Image (cartoon, helix red, strand yellow):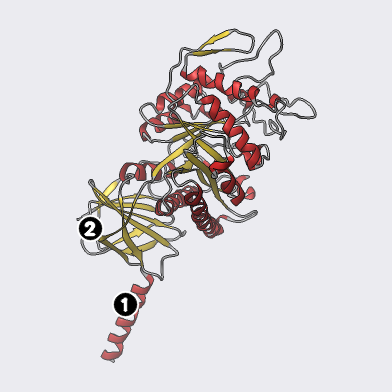
Amino acid sequence: MKRSFAFILVFFSLIGRAQTPQLTVDWNDVVMTSRSTPTLQVVGNPMLRRKAPMHDASFNALKGLGADFVRYVPWFPYPKLAVAELEAPTATKTSWDFSLIDPMTIDFLEATKGHSIIMNFSTIPQWMFKTEKPVTYPADPNLVSWSYGGGTELRDSTMKELTDYYVRLVSWYTKGGFTDELGKYHKSGYHYEIPYWEVLNEPDLEHSMSPQTYIRIYDAMVSALKQVIPNAKFVGMAVANEKPEWFEYFLNPANHKPGIPLDMISYHCYASANSGQKFDDYEYAVFDKAENFINTVKYVENIRKRLSPDTKTDVNELGTFVSEEMRKQPIPAAYWNLSASVYAYFFIELTKAGIDVIGESQLVGFPTQFPDVSMINYINNKPNARFWVLKLIKDNIKSGSKLIKTNIDENHGDNVLAQGFKDEGGKNVLLLNKRNKLIRVMLPSGFKGTQITLIDEASGDNEPKTVTITTDYVDLKPFAVALIKGVN
């Protein structure tokens, strides 16, 4: 009887170990050096206008974050907040007007002062395209207008009309003003630096462009804007879909005019839930899609290295979407932790893939304008888990950090991901739980007494607290993201 009892204890002990993932970190085994910078994008919308409910908290959070390579995109669904010349010039007048665009843009430029930014006024005035009839837009700048689009062919095939618009727009913010089509000078008094300019947004979708058409526009705009911002670097593509022909064509210098720089490319990924899917199944859909995207990134990287190895990469829209069915009801609180965990996953895997800039999308979303990608809670105006995970990574894991050989035993690698980093400031381990359940992770010896910061359902929309680890394990609540630091 005693032997049977002892056997049962050993048996269940072994089962317990098999069900508990074990973290191992070999601090002496450096896998690679990171070249990655975590950041975010800011999309212009009514909630970022002065006196809007989300304005103050959002810009305060952005300023406090202090990130580099922040992408700013005034976007077509709000034409009056994105387009500075909404009507074509005539022989007697022009329609230049920055009065609604400036406040938000200046608030962005001031909030990011001292840090690199990527500017992208992506919306081409609609009157520059050939369409069956003029495209209208709402008189109310706060009303969304998904119809402000259409047209695949510019009315001016030389593209001078297009490039003149962007030269004037950039001059407004960098040269103190510009002279319009009728010879009138418009004074702004602004002299901001624009270190990076991105040419258009999702051209494969927004105007159904071919890579050949896009390259003609890219080359023309870069040639023109280099006269205004000669020290700027340029970002190309910003595609929504990672079609090989786009990368093969754009990254081949032979397809560009002589002297056109290929400083950086950009592209996007949203790991979305499937149509009609319930939240209980999201974790599998979004992480599967995130994993598939990483495989695509590796393929794109092979193209880049072969054709233009000095070109950098910015994956500058990373997020998750709920299903259409879920968007019709309040988004569950656990979703924000899931989405934050997905960004931590992207950061680890894209860092291992050698991506230069890893951008979370987006600072502000709200009902009617992609509420599921917001980093600010549109109900209480507090930064949510998506923001806090970005800040945790940005504050503790720098470009130049060494990636250390790190493992979760193979029985649990599909549920938990971990990566060790070390630099002059010390040693860190980034951990994330992919599943909607509590997972206990056994820690290596020497971790007791270190510091851990946890972002989970308990921290909610509050700034996470850092506590001392007093056990040989850590409990990761559903979709938790943790940073362990101070390892000896």
Q: In which quarter of the image is residue 181?
A: top right
Q: From what the image shows, is residue 475 above or below residue 237?
A: below
Residue 182 in view (yes/no): yes
Q: Which residue is drawn at 62% across and 28% down?
A: 78
Is there CB contact under 8 Å for labels 1 and 2? no
Helix or strand or loop: what does disc 2 sit on?
loop
Residue matched to label 2? 470
**Secondary element at tag 1:** helix
Relative depth, front residue between 215 and 418: 215
Amino acid type assigned to the residue bearing label 2 in the image: Thr
Can residue 376 be spotted in the picture?
Answer: no
Disc 1 designates what residue?
A: 13
Q: Quadrant of the C terminus?
A: bottom left
Q: How far apart are marks 1 and 2 (CA)?
A: 22 Å
Q: Is residue 146 left or right of residue 344?
A: right
Q: Which mark is residue 173?
A: none
